[in-house]
Image (tube, helix red, strand yellow):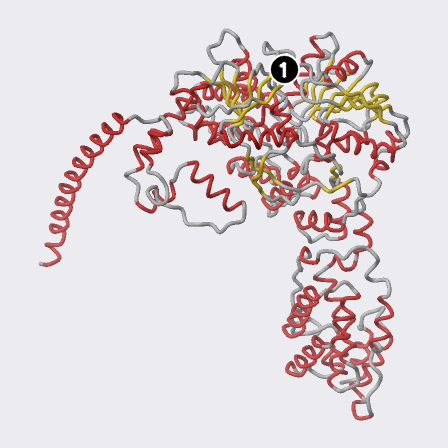
Amino acid sequence: MSFPRCALLWARLPAGRHAGHRAGVCSAFRAHTGPFPGALGRLPAVASASSSASGGSKAPNTSLFVPLTVKPQGPSADGDVGAELTRPLDKNEVKKILDKFYKRKEIQKLGADYGLDARLFHQAFISFRNYIMQSHSLDVDIHIILNDICFSAAHVDDLFPFFLRHAKQIFPVLDCKDDLRKISDLRIPPNWYPEARAMQRKIIFHSGPTNSGKTYHAIQKYLSAKSGVYCGPLKLLAHEIFEKSNAAGVPCDLVTGEERVTVESDGKQAAHVACTVEMCSVTTPYEVAVIDEIQMIKDPARGWAWTRALLGLCAEEIHLCGESAAIDLVTELMYTTGEDVEVRNYKRLTPISVLDHALESLDNLRPGDCIVCFSKNDIYSVSRQIEIRGLESAVIYGSLPPGTKLAQAKKFNDPDDPCKILVATDAIGMGLNLSIRRIIFYSLMKPSINEKGEREIEPITTSQALQIAGRAGRFSSKFKEGEVTTMNREDLSLLREILNRPVDPIKAAGLHPTAEQIEMFAYHLPDTTLSNLIDIFVDFSQVDGQYFVCNMDDFKFSAELIQHIPLSLRVRYVFCTAPINKKQPFVCSSLLQFARQYSRNEPLTFSWLRRYIKWPLLPPKNIKDLMDLEAVHDVLDLYLWLSYRFIDMFPDASLVRDLQKQLDGIIQDGVHNITKLIKISETYKLLNLESLSESQSRLSGTSKSQARRNRSRVLGSKAAEPLAPDAGEKSLASRLVQQGLLTADMLKQLEKEWMTQQTEHGKERTESGTYAKGTRRKKKEPDSD
């Protein structure tokens, strides 16, 4: 190699490298004169640099660190500079060096000091080895050090700085752990709201059971104030306060995730506003604020919204309404802000009693009864059985649109309406004024999601039982005494036990990372997915003892759903916070489609949306149709929610709202005739049951057997194969007779009709088979000739 060429290559060595790198090059020219010291020094020198690498915080969950791909280097336009300065590397020798490096305990320990536990160390090494072995040309510095190790001019430990550099490339979190811990530090949340801390607020806690008048007294303060904000858990409650306030002559605006209503003719904001708790402003000053159902501060998914309202609202007086279980926690939280809490206790206005007998049969129903179920299948079954007995029932469950819920509540409350029975889920626990005499728990087992996002089926809690039971005998209804019982006799003792337990005090309030915090995280980890960012944020986060980080599974579900769509981080974050029912495939696919349209900069117009949902929609003919309409209603809700965040891309909110009202009317008609829809659905299943293949019949099952299978999976038992109807359980016919859906005479008639149909179908198959064979023979004759 000519001296000018050598000088040129020397000049190209990376700037800022240790001088020892260049000293090591001399080994290429003086290999015969004896070894030089290693380019980067020995292991103790490297170790001394890591004295503060691991920090003093809790060890992160490294399973959340997703390795990035570092591609091997291809041929360089300048050639293999390292090989020209030294010599080409023998891949077999290099592999032996790398294997020796991996097995050294000192290297593994040093890696642990830099945050590389056994799992990360192994992944980083595999990537490092592949990078070196598969690269056409390596960086000059690492080529030289490998060459020096081959000539015993350097120690195998000298590879560690290069290995660590590579590890930080595939795990960038290793290089910024301290910064990430600072960003995700959620301690002292009161300091997040400087406007609220700048004023001395008066906190008044209205504590009492359902139907004790606690919310009424808080609302009276709200109405008499010069300005105020009501923060409720449901759109229905916000609507109710909005209507009450304006009816009382107090102009009040409405703000929910999907709706904004201003009452002033000039469009200015009114001094009072009723909103859902997530939508409250923490910068607008008010005289009075009301935070309803404050015990929901413990909610695993939504608790952060109550925490934010409690700590951040800028109001002279804040009135909290809720269970006594939240008093101690609220007092502790307000102690950190330097604010005192005044507690006002209320007692129930009307008596309520647990009956000493269960209902046992739907024949024992009386006007004013409400049967509470915890699954839609139970609602459908009970409604159908009530209809068979010649009674009419109203139906309320969570996924119904608010307008339909109100219509069903009005129907049930109307003394002139023949509907005297209500079948509902725990959706009646808040948000609806109902005239109920007796609450009947159809079951005490309820599916729920725990703090880890896992599905569980457990008995309802004391708080839930009291909330639901308290709907009976309300002060404003015609029934001045409430009664509570169960459907099954064996559940009655458990209900008494649940109701008599003291409500566990709430110990922690929910928190949630903000968009700004996630953006700062993404700045340090630009190639990490949003779902993975959330996981790492939650793992790195530090909270005080009175707080917890809310479950973010729904957010992560949406993030993974739209991950492949090119969106800015802020826009992606907003899409992921959109409230969707992830059990509804059409709603999920709609979120995906909306995000895709947005990424193309194509506005989602009213005409586009009509085509997308295939409007106009027909009234439901069966339960499946009704559920499909409910899903479409949720999609329109999603459009409206996004329209207030991206006005230019979702421009037709008013037209969509009118469309949603029409759809609400269609759903109301369907729910009004729900027993007919159930009957049609059951009839359809019955007539098609025998014509299904054996494999299909195994999959069909009844709703109750499916529920049992689901329950066994949820509880962690081994998933058994679905049984055919006659294996391990009663036949469908006997179950229908037992449930009162079939009589013996009807069963005989069905059997006759079935035999007749089978005979006719057999003849048709014989004739068609003969004809087909003859046809095939005719086709084959020319070929044989």
The residue lying furthest to the bottom in this view is: 32
Front residue of this view, candidates 659 and 531: 531
Q: Is residue 228 left or right of residue 566?
A: right
Q: Say few, some or many: other residues with alpha carbon within 10 Å of mark 1 (under 14 / 14 to 19 / 20 or more).
A: many
Front residue of this view, candidates 700 and 642: 700
Position of residue 534 measured from the top left corner of the image (x, y, whole percent): 69, 47
Q: Is the residue 465 above or below the residue 532 in the image?
A: above
Q: Is the residue 475 above or below the residue 615 in the image?
A: above
Quarter where residue 363 is shown: top left
Q: Which residue lies at the image location 79% right of the left edge and 56% below the top edge?
A: 176
Position of residue 82 measured from the top left corner of the image (x, y, whole percent): 74, 78
Q: Which residue lies at the image location 60% right of the left edge and 33% below the top edge?
A: 460
Q: Can residue 400 be seen by looking at this rendering?
A: no
Front residue of this view, candidates 362 and 489: 489
The C terminus, quarter of image: bottom left
Q: Is the residue 244 above or below the residue 645 in the image?
A: above
Q: Amino acid at mark 1?
A: Arg
Quarter where residue 568 is shown: top right
The N terminus, quarter of image: bottom right
Position of residue 327 measured from the top left corner of the image (x, y, whole percent): 78, 29
Q: Can residue 256 be seen by looking at this rendering?
A: yes
In terms of secondary structure, where does tag 1 sit?
Answer: loop
Position of residue 36 measured from the top left corner of the image (x, y, whole percent): 84, 86
The residue lying furthest to the left in this view is: 785
Q: Which residue lies at the image location 30% right of the left edge and 44% below the top edge?
A: 693
Q: Which residue is mark 1?
A: 474
Q: Is residue 659 left or right of residue 158?
A: left
Q: Is residue 400 left or right of residue 220?
A: left
